[in-house]
Each structure stands twice: as structure tokens, then as C-alpha cells.
Image: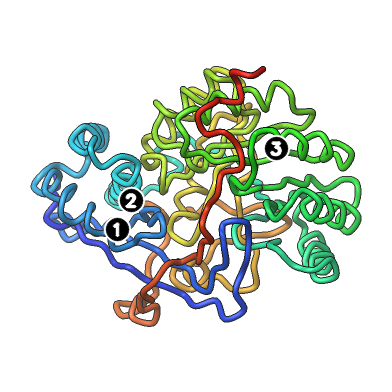
Amino acid sequence: MSRITKVACKLISEPLPAGWTAAHGTSHKRDECLVFVTTEDGLVGMGEAYHAFSPKVMASIVEEHLADIIVGRDSSEIQLLWEEMFFSAGQLGSAAVAAISGIDIALWDLMGRRLNRPIADLLGGGGVRRVPTYVGCMCLGFQDAKSLREEVRGYVADGFTALKVRGGLNLEADLEAVAVTREAAGAYIDIMIDANSAYSPPESLQLARKLERYNTFWLEDPFDFSVAYHHADMGWLRRNSPVPIASGGNVYTRFNARSLIDAGGVDYLTPDVTKCGGISEGLKIAALASAFNITVAPHTVVGVGTVAGVHYAAALPTHIRGHLEWDASVTNPLRDELCVPALDIANGSVLVPRGPGLGIALPGPDALERFAFIAGREISMPPRQRRWDPNRPQAAAE
């Protein structure tokens, strides 16, 4: 037994001088909420909690609410601690689930360090050496056709076989972006598009029907996931769409995933272990997907969470293991400089780390000081406006 003595967060940022724009706004920085769990024998586990554009709030939930529940407890009782945190935080909603995610990842990192085994091995994925990836995250954002074409060709030359374009500007622009990507990538590259919840259900179906001509691999999250009837509308879209539908990056816990699956809303489920409840809950979501033969293609965001996502992807059942999202942009120091050794990406697949726990460590005791937290929103989001009746679920009009 090794009891937990401390739970703490560290907020860090990385400026993006060139900026990056998609349907939900423009970003001039990356933020990351790191979670550290320390035990009485001096071991420290590291995790990441999705910050939800409010990293200070996330750190407060971890340090002021959840820490009180687990300090003094046995760090190996991961499932028990998860349940106690979850059922004590019902009034905090999905923000609490993201906070629990960071702690859960840190507890798995601790377990692996104590046993001197990679997390993937502990989860049963020890036989998987590499995980296939697709280009996503802060790549292929809004830009002119020439620069998009150049970016696409660069990823294809690097060996990637799947690319996700950012959509949501308008239907015409989205179709042009996919057309340019298809022309630049060739016929044998999988092309996805993420509309980042920009459209109404009717507009989403219009887009899906027009995407078919480009052999689109999937259409992801085309409309608002926060409305109560989102899952029913996703089911309606999937039943009528000629292209596969992906969702799940904003699905929290197995209970929400079950609702989406029951509604018939997805061909590809995209949970993120920094959001969905951590590695522990991600495995339960995968078990649900497995029972319905739904492919799981894990969503990722920044650094430590991406490493955790690699271990999670390695442990997925083989018949549902899809591509892992990968940020292939020129610089991502929150992943490539802070996570040592850096992840090995080659020909579109990433090597599963073989060190204990996450298999990474910070490069030095002062490594985080270089990435001082930058106040303000990570993404400057424009006001959202609904262009359809919010009181009438689209599925009801089928």
C-alpha cells in the first residue's frame, strides 16, 4: 500500500504566434492542465485534465474538491477512487469528469512506475507496438487553397494516410476544403472533416450528402453537442447520411456514450481520456463500443494527454481499434519537449512508450517554468447563434 499525500495542478501555456483558426474561433496559444499525484514513498504520477477553456476552474476542482477525497487513500485502488470522486461531484457536471480524468491518468502512471511496467501492458495492450494515427488537432485549419494544398502534401509525404480537415465556415467553403484535400492527397488517403458543431441538423445533412462525392471517411460533430436532444439528432443524421458519422470527443463517461450509441448516432466513437473520465472510463466506453462493433478512434489534444491516449489506443480490442488523433503541426513543445523521450512517430503510426507508467518524464525540475501560464481563453470563440428551432428535435420531424 502507498498512500496519496498530495494532489496538485500546474497550468502551462505555449504561444502560437501564427495563430490557428477553425469553426470555434482563433487560437493564439495552447493551454494544458497537468495533474500530479504524490504518494508517501515519494513517487509522483502525472496526468492531464482537459481544461475546457477554463483551466483555473479545472485546477480548482482538482485541488479543492477531488483532492480531499483521495488524499490519505491507497493509490492502487484506482477504480474505487474513481467511483468515490465521480459520485461526490454530480453537481459539477462534465467539468468534474474532466478533472477526474487527470487524476485517473496520474494514478495509472503511478501504478506503472511502481510495477515498472508501461500502462499499455497493465491494460492488456502489451502486444501492440505501434498505433495508427490521423492528422488532426491544430492542423488543416481555415486557410486559402494554396496553403492547404501544401500542408496536405507535406503530411502525405511524411507517410500519413488519414487527414482531418477543419470545417464549419460554411457549406461551400467546407466542400472546397475537402475537394482541395482530396486533389492534393490522392485517391487512397482517408479524409475526415470536423465541423466543430457549426451547423443545424438540416445543414449537416446537406453537407453529408455533398461530401459523398469525395469519398469522405467521416463527418465529425456537425452540430451542437450541448443540447439535450443531441444524441437523438445524431441518430437521425446517421440514418440519413451517405457518409459515416463520428462523435465522442465531447462525450463524458460510459453513461453518455451509451446514450449516443443507443440513439444510433455514430459509426466512429472518439473518446478523449483527458475528458471522458480517464483511462479507466475510456476502457468502459470501449467495451460498450465493442459490443456494437463501433470503431473507437481516440481524440487527443496536447501533450501528456496524447501519451495517455497512445497507451489507451494500444489496449483497445483489435476489431474496433481505429486511428488515434495526432497533432502533426510543425511545433508542439508541450508534447515534444516536455514529454521525454519524445513520442516516436513514423509513417503515420506512433510507437507505444515502453518505459514505466506513461513512459515519459519531464526533462528537468524547472522544465515547466519555461511554459508560464498565459491568462485568457485558449480559443477566442465568437458568439454562438442557433439558426433553427431549439425546442423541436430534428429527429421528431423524421
Residue 120 in the image: state x and y as whole percent: 46, 43
Name the colour scheme.
rainbow
Q: Is residue 261 left or right of residue 203?
A: left
Q: Amino acid at mark 3?
A: Ser
Residue 377 lies, with reference to residue 83, above or below; the image says below
Q: Secondary structure at mark 2?
A: helix
Q: Amino acid at mark 1?
A: Val
Q: Is residue 36 left or right of residue 258?
A: left
Residue bearing the label numbered 1: 35
**Within-10-Å neighbours for mark 3: few <14, some 14–19, many 20+:** many
Residue bearing the label numbered 3: 204
Q: Nearer the viewer, mark 2 or mark 3?
A: 3
Mark 2 to mark 3 CA distance (whole Å): 33 Å
Residue at image position (90%, 52%) is 186
Residue 44's label in the rendered image is none
Residue 334 showing in the rendered view: yes
* Callout 1–callout 2 Cβ contact below 8 Å: yes
Residue at image position (29%, 56%) is 58
Mark 1 vs 2, N-terminal side: 1
Residue 199 in the image: state x and y as whole percent: 64, 43
Residue placed most toward the observer, 4 or 222 = 222
Residue 130 showing in the rendered view: no
Q: Quadrant of the C terminus?
A: top right
Residue 102's label in the rendered image is 2
